[in-house]
Amino acid sequence: MMAEGPGAPRAAVGETGAGLSVRAPAKINLYLHVTGKRDDGFHLLDSLVAFAGLHDLVGLRHADEFSLKVEGPYADAVPTGPENLVLKAAEKLGRAAGISKGCAITLKKNLAVASGIGGGSADAAAVLRGLVALWEIDLDAPDALDLGTLALEIGADVPVCLFGRSAFMGGIGEDIIRAPALPPVWLVLVNPNVPSSTPAVFKERKGDFSQAARFDAAPASAEELAGILKVRGNDLWEAAARLAPVIGDVLESLNSADECLLARMSGSGATCFGLFDDAGGAARAAAEIGRGHPDWWVRATPLLDDTQTA
C-alpha cells in the first residue's frame, strides 16, 4: 500500500520546448533491514528511504514509436535493450493506459549503475511521472490504472522512487509509509566505480533476519538522526563487502573524515554515504576523499526535504 495514494506521486517535471524533462533523484537507504523471506524467494525489507540532491535527467517527447538515447558520464554502462527499466516502464504504462503512440526518451545518466542509489529504478519512476503528464493520463478517474502496482511490477525500488518523499519501505517494496520529517542534513556519497549486483548480494547474505525498526518522532537535528540510525544498520553491507572488498575501504574513508556523524552503505551497494551536519563539513570531506581516491565518484549533496525536488 502506498501512503497518500499512488495517483499523486511527487513529480519533478519541467516543460521543454519539445516535451518534458524529469529529474530522477538518487535514492538513499538510511537504514535497511532484511526481515524475512517469502516462499517464492523474495526477501522482505524494512528501510528508511530518502532522496539526495543529485539526479539523472529524463527527457520525453511525443513520437510514433518508443526509442531510447542514453548520454552522460555513465552512458556506456546502461543497457539499451528490452531489459532497460526506462523502456520497460514506458511500454508497460502505454499498454496499461491504452496509449497507441510511443515516446522518444533521452536519459542523461549522471548516477553510477548498479550502485545502490536507485539508478534504473529512479529513472523508471521518472518516466512514469513524466508520461502521466505528457500523455495526460487521469489517475483520478474511477477506472484509472493503479500506478503503484504497475511500478512494483517493474522493480522493487520503483514504488518508493515514484512516491518521491522520505518514507519507510516494507514488504518487497509495495508497503510505502511516509516517514517523519527529517532535519537538514548533508551527505557525502562515494562510489568506487565497482558495480554491485543486488541478486548476488542477497544470495551471499548470511545470518538471521532483523526486526523492523521504524520510528514516529521527527529527529530535530542531523546529530539526532545519526543517533537513531546508529542503532539500526544495513543488513546487506557485509555480503556486499565480501563480493567487493573496496566497499570496506569506502566506509573507512568516510568514517575517518572529520565531522562525519555516521557512515553507511546504501541499498545493496556499492555506494556509501557519510552523514554531515552542514554543507561545509560535507564539502571538506568530499574534497579530502576525492584527493586520496581520484578514481572514485565522490559528491557532497544535501538530503532533500519533502518540500524540495531534486
Image (cartoon, rainbow, N blue to C red):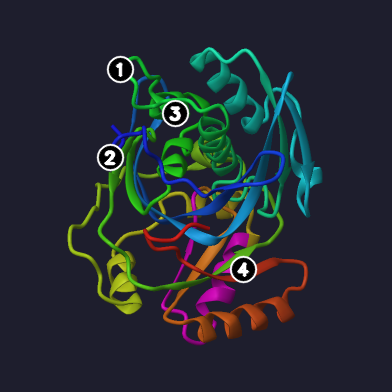
**Quick one: label 3, few (<14), some, or many (20+) residues within 10 Å?**
some
Q: Amino acid at mark 4?
A: Asp
Instruction: Give percent across and percent down for residue 98.
Output: 53, 12
In magenta, the rendered stretch is 247-267
Labels 1 and 3: the sequence-earlier one: 1
Tell me the SS state at disc 2. Answer: loop
Q: Which label lies toward us, 2 or 4?
A: 2
What residue appears at the point 71 percent right and 49 percent down from the top-left corner?
109
Instruction: Give percent across and percent down for residue 244.
Output: 64, 53
Instruction: Give percent across and percent down for residue 188.
Output: 55, 71
Q: Which label lies toward us, 1 or 3?
A: 1
Tell me the SS state at disc 3. Answer: helix
Q: Amino acid at mark 3?
A: Leu
Q: Which label lies toward us, 2 or 1?
A: 1
Tell me the SS state at disc 1. Answer: loop
Q: Which residue is mark 3?
A: 152
Labels 2 and 3: the sequence-earlier one: 2
**Quick one: label 2, few (<14), some, or many (20+) residues within 10 Å?**
some
Q: Amino acid at mark 1?
A: Pro
Q: Which mark is residue 142?
A: 1
Q: CA distance from mark 4 to mark 1?
A: 53 Å
Q: Which residue is mark 4?
A: 249
Tell me the SS state at disc 4. Answer: helix
Q: Amino acid at mark 2?
A: Ala
The answer to whether the residue labelled 2 contacts the one labelled 3, judged by CB atoms less than 8 Å apart, is no
**Quick one: label 1, few (<14), some, or many (20+) residues within 10 Å?**
few
Labels 2 and 4: the sequence-earlier one: 2
Q: Which residue is mark 2?
A: 3
- In the rendered view, would you say 39 is above or below 69? above
